[in-house]
Image (cartoon, rainbow, N blue to C red):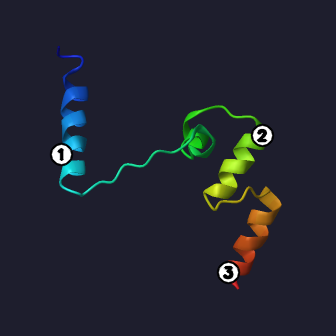
Amino acid sequence: HSKSKHIYIRHHFIREQVEKGMVELYFVTTDYQLMDIFTKALPRERFEFLLLRLGMKSMSSATLKRLQEEEGE
């Protein structure tokens, strides 16, 4: 019981928040599970797809250095 108690408490907390209208839950298909990028090892193509959906870009160190220099001007 003690090992699963935290799950029980969290489950009921979230359920209460949904009932109060504080949290809305939406179904998201596997293809659009954006958090996979933070929790799984992904093939490059999948990683880049999710990166774009998050509004992020992958940049080389040279690009980052140039942007940093431009910011300092």
Label 2: which secondary element: helix
- Measured in 3D between alpha carbons, the distance from the residue under mark 3 to the one under mark 1, in whole angstroms, is 48 Å
Name the residue carrying label 1. 16
Residue 40 has which mark?
none
Residue annotated with mark 3: 72
Q: Earlier in the sequence, mark 3 or mark 1?
A: 1
Of marks 1 and 2, which one's residue comes earlier in the chain?
1
Please tell me whether mark 3 sits on a helix, a strand or a loop: helix
Residue at x 70% of width, y 86% of height: 73
- Residue 48, image x, y percentages: 74, 49
**Numbered disc in front, either 2 or 3:** 2
What amino acid type is highlighted by mark number 1?
A: Glu
Instruction: Please state which amino acid type lies under the numbered disc 3.
Output: Gly
Q: Of the residues shown, which amino acid type is indicated by label 2?
A: Arg
Rendering coords of residue 65 (x, y %): 76, 66
Compared with residue 70, is residue 64 higher up or lower down, i.e. above or below? Answer: above
Decide which of 66, 16 is in the foreground and name it. 16
Asked if marks 3 and 1 touch (Cβ < 8 Å), the reply is no
Cα gap from disc 2 to disc 3, whole angstroms: 32 Å
